[in-house]
Image (spheres, rainbow, N blue to C red):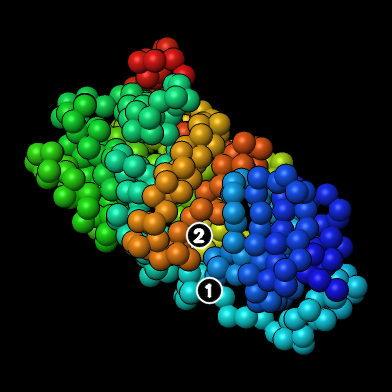
């Protein structure tokens, strides 16, 4: 019994990639452009003791599995192991290969999040944000490019640069918020300052950004100072729940809402409503869970997926995605009037693929900055996310709302939001 024999019994005779194992056995098509290398018995232990995507992900992050070739090819195998449950025969074969130790779980790689305290408490939210964002600013520059913008870009042409596409997205948000010189903008989850800089430079606003990441805040302040906008842009290290210097004319929240959580959703929108002037606008840009995926995630499957999901443990601990209808209802229940909803799903798939390209092109430098395990987490996560958006397993929506006062929304009869080039 070889590792190749075991894999054949699990995956069937025609896997989409080739396999090469530590015992010298091989399995899969001879002309495959991608090979998964099983470097040690520990990889099998991971898969047996933590089935589905988590065991495979842990083995890859720990370096017990290697991918030679195209990371996107591996996701076809991930589809096959998503519901993997080894039968008695496969378990016996694994025991023969690995020994009784195959049934004893290995400690997870150190990159796995270990949060403590009440979910979405201030301290736990701060720890979750630090786990994800306080990795290395230079690491993120390698992945995100010079725009340092960690959210879905807007592609008027697939051949455009990432920086052009991110500028398109920021301009679209500014147009939806109807920003004008002298207005006050609050950007919740302001990251490395991309939206703040664009709004201040291109639309003349006075902008305040808030982030729970110390490293983001420090670099954002430097970027603002370097281009001479410190008199119009303020970056705060802190919680949006502590912002109390309204009213603002507009609020943008781009790629932060995923960290709020269903239990805090009402409080989040109430805080935004309180901080806006009458007729002020809110733009909430966030990843959404499609309704058909939500139907899949009920009952036993949902509980098991929550326990084993790779993204929750390694990328966005405590992150929660909501169906866009839930978001719209949550906004309106707190007194806003929703005026416009737009899906950018395909745009995020393109964005993530560019980030994967950047990471792979700068792999050596990325490993130096954040460690090989962390680089492996991001490579696997971003590739899987890109495929998920391609398949409509994930969506991203911009929801625009206004603080309508006495029936007056402040909106023209036919608002035009499009960026200078059609998209």
Name the side, left or right, on which 102 lies relative to 322.
right
Query: Of residues 408 and 3, which is closer to you in this image?
Result: 3
- Gap between marks 1 and 2, in whole Å? 11 Å
Residue 30 seen from this side? yes
Q: Position of residue 172 (x, y in %)?
A: 37, 26
Quickly name the residue at label 1.
Answer: 109
Residue drawn at x 30%, y 54% is: 138
> Eyeballing the image, is 54 above or below 209?
below
Residue drawn at x 35%, y 49% is: 142
Residue drawn at x 32%, y 48% is: 141
Name the side, left or right, on which 338 lies relative to 189.
right
Looking at the image, the residue that sits furthest to the top is 414
Quickly name the residue at label 2.
Answer: 376
Numbered disc 2: secondary structure: helix
Query: Of residues 53 and 375, which is closer to you in this image?
Result: 375
Numbered disc 1: secondary structure: loop
The answer to which quarter of the image holds residue 198 is top left
Residue drawn at x 56%, y 42% is: 386
């Amino acid at each position: 019994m070889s590792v190749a024999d075991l894999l054949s019994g699990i995956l069937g005779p025609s896997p989409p990639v080739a396999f090469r194992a530590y015992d010298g056995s091989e399995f899969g098509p001879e002309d495959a452009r991608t090979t998964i290398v099983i470097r040690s018995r520990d990889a099998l232990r991971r898969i047996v003791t933590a089935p589905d995507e988590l065991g495979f992900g842990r083995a890859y992050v720990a370096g017990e599995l290697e991918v030679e070739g195209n990371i996107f090819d591996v996701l076809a195998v991930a589809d096959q192991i998503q519901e993997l449950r080894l039968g008695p025969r496969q378990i016996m074969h694994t025991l023969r290969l690995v020994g009784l130790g195959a049934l004893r779980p290995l400690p997870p790689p150190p990159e796995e999040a270990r949060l403590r305290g009440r979910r979405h408490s201030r301290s736990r939210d701060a720890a979750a944000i630090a786990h994800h964002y306080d990795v290395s600013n230079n690491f993120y520059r390698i992945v995100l490019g010079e725009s340092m913008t960690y959210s879905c870009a807007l592609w008027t042409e697939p051949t455009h640069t990432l920086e052009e596409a991110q500028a398109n997205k920021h301009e679209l948000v500014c147009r939806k918020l109807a920003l004008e010189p002298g207005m006050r903008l609050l950007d919740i989850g302001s990251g490395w300052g991309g939206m703040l800089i664009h709004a201040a430079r291109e639309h003349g606003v006075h902008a305040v950004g808030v982030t729970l990441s110390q490293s983001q805040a420090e670099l954002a302040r430097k970027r603002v100072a370097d281009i001479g906008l410190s008199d119009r842009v303020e970056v705060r290290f802190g919680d949006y729940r502590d912002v109390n210097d309204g009213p603002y004319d507009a609020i943008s929240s781009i790629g932060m809402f995923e960290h709020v959580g269903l239990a805090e959703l009402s409080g989040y929108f109430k805080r935004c409503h309180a901080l806006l002037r009458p007729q002020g606008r809110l733009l909430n840009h966030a990843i959404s869970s499609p309704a058909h995926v939500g139907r899949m995630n009920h009952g036993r499957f949902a509980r098991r997926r929550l326990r084993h999901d790779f993204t929750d443990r390694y990328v966005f601990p405590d992150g929660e995605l909501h169906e866009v209808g839930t978001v719209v209802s949550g906004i309106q229940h707190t007194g806003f009037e929703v005026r416009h909803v737009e899906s950018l799903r395909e745009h995020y798939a393109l964005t993530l693929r560019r980030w994967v390209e950047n990471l792979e092109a700068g792999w050596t430098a990325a490993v130096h900055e954040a460690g090989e395990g962390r680089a492996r987490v991001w490579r696997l996560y971003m590739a899987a996310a890109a495929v998920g958006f391609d398949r409509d397993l994930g969506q991203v929506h911009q929801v625009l709302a206004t603080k309508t006062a006495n029936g007056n929304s402040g909106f023209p009869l036919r608002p035009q939001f499009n960026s200078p080039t059609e998209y």
